[in-house]
Each structure stands twice: as structure tokens, then as C-alpha cells.
Amino acid sequence: MSKIIKTGLLSFGLSGKVFHAPFVNEHIGFELTAVVERSKKTIKEVYPDVISYDSVDEILADNNLDLIIVNTPNNTHYDFAVKALQAKKHVLMEKPFAITSKEAKELYKVAAENDCKILAYHNRRYDSDYLSVKKVLESGDLGNVVEAHIRFDRYKTEIGPKAVKETAEVPGSGITYDLGSHIVDAAISLFGLPVSWHKKKGYYRENTQVDDFMCAYIEFPNNIHVHVTTSLLVPNPQSSFVIHGTKGTYVKQRINLQEEQLMTGMQITDANYGVEPKGIEGELTIALNATERKTIKIPAEPATYMHIFEAVYQTIINGKEYPITEAQIVKQLEILEA
């Protein structure tokens, strides 16, 4: 294998156009070589040298490809990943990694049997709000963490047009596997592997077949208590992270900055890409003593999803440990499927 990872995308819809193609195209260690476009053929309007295949079987038969990005509907992830691994391709897997923890374990096993890497794509670890929280936790300013609240809120009362997301019979449908994957991953990546959890789901939209509310209480080592919540029925979205420690509190609102910038056509090389606007800084409150408090605004550093592609490159080419581990993915899915 050369130092250039020739990459194929299984879909060129929203995720392919926004979250994957721009970064694969820009990173000098990757080549965007091929995509699957079953109906509309639009890839050549943006990337004229990329091959457009009609099916997954066709792209997997391309012996020039080193990496396959599985960014198809949730219920197809396991089957397509197995096929890709058996075709001796490395795999970058969109969330959810699988529907069950059993499937996840099997995928890692198939990858090892075929001397390939299967890597989870959790881009929200490289959002500015998450990175801000991680930096504050590492600073020690909060003291020992006691509790954390992690939310991902939206307001969407209508039933969406995509059957794979809104049909009860389709595995992996509903908000638990959609936004829930992000917040459970955030909790595990910040606080370690949990020791216990209790999860609830809700169905509130008129005529909904799938869950549109999920919350879980998760206990972590060192007696850290974390509440994760996601809902499609929050007209006034709450802070994405609220962390309470023995010495302070940190509050950070969610900002979907990179996705919004990419959707409007901003290039990832733009100086303003991933840079939060002023006025939405995180707020760190430190207890000076029993009665006095000091509040500090914490500006977020620039963020980019390019870091996850760099991690993929380093793992495949140089054998470095990937930051999103098998143990984390398996535990995440145990919570989602509970």
C-alpha cells in the first residue's frame, strides 16, 4: 500500500458531500477515488476525476481502493462493512457503528481476520464545544467532577420523509441511534468506560413510530454521575455541556458550526472555518471560598474535522492507536441497545 489512501464513499448524499468528501479531497494523504451514486450522478460536478459506481458491489470490486467509508443508512452498516472488510478494504464507519454490541464485536473480529482496520467516525469529538469542555476538564479547574449533563436538542415536530429514520421496523431508527450516539460517545470519551447505566425512551410526536426522546443516567468510575438527554421537542435548546466539580462549574452551549459552514459552501481552508463567533464562549465559575465566586469566559479554539481524518491516516499508514477504541464503541452500543 502506498502512502496515499485511495478512498471510496458508499454514498454521496448529505454526509458524503459535507462530512467526508471535502476532507478526503483536501488531506494530502488521501485520494477521493470513487463513490456510489445509485440514481443522481452529481459527483463529477464537484470532483470531476472521481469514479461514480452504480452499486456497492461495484465499488468493492475496485482493487485500487484502500479505504471504504460506510455512510449509508444505519441498518446497512453491518452488512456493508463486512463485505468491505472481506474485500480487504479498511473501513471508516459512520455512527452508529452498528445496531448491537454483538455486531460491533463481530466487525472488529472480521477486520482482524482480514488484516484490516475498522474505525469509528465520531466527528463530534472535534467540535469546538466538546474540545472546550475537554480542555477545561484537563486543566483541573473544576476539581473532582461530581456530575455532568450532556444534551443534544432540536425542535422538529413533523415526521421526516426518510423511512429508514422514521419506521419502527427498521433497525437503528429513532433518535437514540441518531443523536444519542453522539452524546453517549461524548460521555464515554470524557469520563471513561461506565460502570452502570439506566436508559429511557419516549414517543411524543403525533403519529411517530420511533423514539424522539432519550435520556440515560450513566455512572462512571470515581463516582462521576452523568445524565445524557436528546430530544426533538425542545423549542429552546439548552446548554450542551454542564459540568459540576468540587471547585467549579463549566457551562457550554452547543454550536453546530462546522456543519453549518460546510452546508453554506465554506471551504475548510477558509480562515474562519471552525472559529466560533464572539459572544458564545463557555462560562467557567470557580468557587474561591464558601461565598465568593469568579466567572471566566472561555473562548473555544478553532476546530476542524480534519483531525479525525488525520487520525485515520496515522492509524492505517503508521500503525498509531486510533483515539476511538473498540472498548468505547462496544460499551456505547450496550447503552444504546439497552
Image (cartoon, helix red, strand yellow):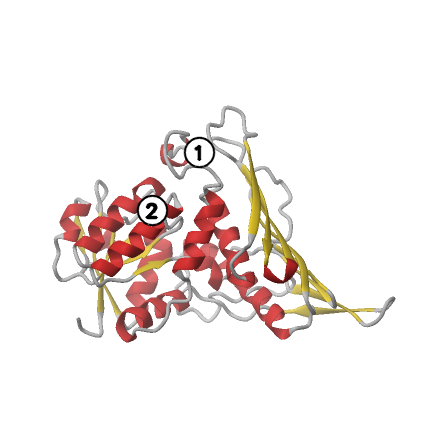
In the picture, measured across the screen, residue 61 lies left or right of residue 153, that is left
Q: Nearer the viewer, residue 316 or 269?
A: 316
Report the disc number at residue 93: none
Q: Quadrant of the N terminus?
A: bottom left
- Type of the residue with mark 2: Glu
Instruction: Relative to 307, say whether 332 is above or below.
Output: above
SS at mark 2 in the image: helix
The residue lying toward the viewer, choosing from 101 and 298, is 101
Residue 309 is situated, as x and y percent measured from the top left of the image, at: 35, 66
Residue at image location 50% in from the left, 24% down from the top: 207
Q: Is residue 19 visible?
A: yes
Give the image quarter of residue 139: bottom right
Residue 179 visible from this viewpoint: no
Return the residue at label 1. Answer: 160
Image: 90 above or below 72: below
- Figure check: 80 above or below 202: below
Judge left or right: residue 153 versus residue 74. Answer: right
The residue indicated by pointer 2 is: 103
- SS category of the residue bearing label 1: loop
| Amino acid type shown at disc 1 | Gly
Residue 15 pos. (x, y %): 36, 51
At horizontal 38% and vertical 43% (from top left) the residue drawn is 99
Mark 1 and mark 2 in contact? Answer it, CB < 8 Å.
Answer: no
Structural distance between the alpha carbons of marks 1 and 2: 27 Å
Looking at the image, the residue that sits furthest to the right is: 291
Q: Position of residue 163 (x, y in %)?
A: 37, 32
Return the residue nearer the eye: 336 or 266: 336
* Rendered image quadrant of residue 296: bottom right
Nearer the observer, 214 or 293: 214
Graded by Cα atoms within 10 Å as few (under 14), some (14 to 19) or many (20 or more), the crowding at tag 2 reads some
